[in-house]
Image (spheres, grey):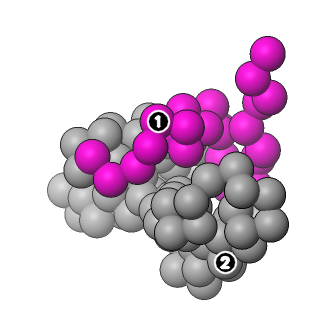
Amino acid sequence: MWERSTLVATIARAIAVRTGAAAPDVALLAGLLHNIGSVYLLARADKHVALFRTAATRDVLMHDRQAPIGKAIAQNWGCLMSSPTRSASRTRSIGTMPERAT
C-alpha cells in the first residue's frame, strides 16, 4: 500500500510540475494520501472482524467505502484543496481514473 502511495505521489508531483495544474507539494500530498480511507478501514479491522472475515466482503467494503472515508479525513484535516478532494470522491477504486468534469 505504501509503495503504491509513494508512486502515485511521485507521479502526481511530476504532472503538477509539468502542467502547472496544481502546486507540486499539494499534488505530492494528495498522492500520498489518496488511499488514506483504506488505512483507516484496515486500522479498525480488528474491531469489526465480521466485516473482514472473507476476502469478498473485505474487498467490497474497501472498494465502496475507502474513497468517502478518505474524503472525510482530508476535509477534517483541512489539508487538501477542494479539487483533489472532489477527485477522490469520484474515484471508485485504486487504479480508476476520476471522471472528467463536464
x, y (%) of residue 21? 70, 50
Placement of the N terminus among the 4 image quadrants? bottom right
Identify the image quadrant of residue 18: bottom right
x, y (%) of residue 4? 64, 75
65, 16: nearer the viewer: 16
Q: Main secondary structure of the magenta part?
A: loop
Q: Is residue 96 magenta?
A: yes
Which residue type carries mark 1?
Answer: Ser
Question: In this picture, is 19 found above or below 92?
Answer: below
45, 88: nearer the viewer: 88
**Residue at horizontal 59%, vertical 67%?**
24
Pick out the residue farthest to the front: 20
Decide if residue 43 is in sight here: yes
3D distance between C-alphas at marks 2 and 1: 20 Å
- What residue does disc 2 label? 10
**Residue at horizontal 24%, vertical 50%?**
77
**Residue at horizontal 46%, vertical 36%?**
82
Question: In this picture, is 68 found above or below 32?
Answer: above
**Residue at horizontal 31%, vertical 40%?**
75
Secondary structure under the numbered disc 1 in the rendered image: helix
Pick out the residue farthest to the left: 47
Decide if residue 61 is in sight here: no
Which residues make up the magenta segment?
78-102
